[in-house]
Image: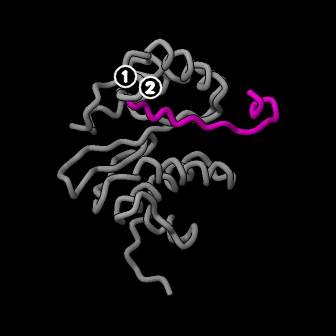
Amino acid sequence: RAAKAAGTKISFDLNYRESFWKGREAELRAAFTEIASLADILIGNEEDFQLSLGIEGPEAGGKDLAAKIEGFKGMIARVKQAFPNAHMFATTLREVVSANEHLWGAILLAQPRAIPVLDRIGGGDGFVGGLLYGVLKGFEAEKCLHFGWATGALATTVLTDYALPADEDQVMSIWAGNARVKR
């Protein structure tokens, strides 16, 4: 509330964890609803929005992603209606092809693209970090999503939970699919 009163942009990554909230679902809903009502940016996957905020969405599971994109868009429209103070809504899209390859996208991407996966841990957080970086830099919404997608994809190619891109050009080169060496 203090951040909102001070004019600070508020992002909220719902990041629902069932084991933490087991038996405390009413407390979860009340706390997350209050925070979401203050947020400018809401981020989460289909389970996050459904289980944390009670917003109807597509079946969870990460299979047949192409068929679910419209369901994700409909869910985001319902989130926007329920939380009109927020002006940006995002979700990553993941379909597991194998342990070492996923289709990775974000809600505004036309089609997910195959990415090499060394370690999937950190991909979602990499996306959020890149998305918020773009917001703070004043990028247009689509570029924020592209930047987030690229930083999330980059995070899956290393054994740590985070990636350390050299600069914005490197990240946007990943988004563009540029394999050329830049010297």
Q: Quadrant of the N terminus?
A: top right
Mark 2: few/some/many CA within 10 Å (<14, 14-19, 20+): many
Residue drawn at x 54%, y 73% as measured from the top left: 166
Mark 2, secondary structure of its residue? helix
Q: Which mark is residue 49?
A: 2
Q: Nearer the viewer, mark 2 or mark 1?
A: 2
Q: Which residues are magenta?
A: 1-17
The kind of residue on which mark 2 rests is: Phe
Mark 1: few/some/many CA within 10 Å (<14, 14-19, 20+): many
Q: How many marks?
A: 2
Residue named by callout 1: 57
Magenta span contains residue 11: yes
The kind of residue on which mark 1 rests is: Gly
Q: Are marks 2 and 1 in contact (CB under 8 Å)?
A: yes
The percent coordinates of residue 58 (x first, y second) are 32, 25
Judged from this view, the residue extending furthest toward the bottom is: 183
N-term-proximal mark, 2 vs 1 = 2
Horizontally, residue 87 falls left or right of residue 151, namely right
Residue drawn at x 57%, y 35% as measured from the top left: 12
Magenta span contains residue 131: no
Most foreground residue, 93 or 23: 23
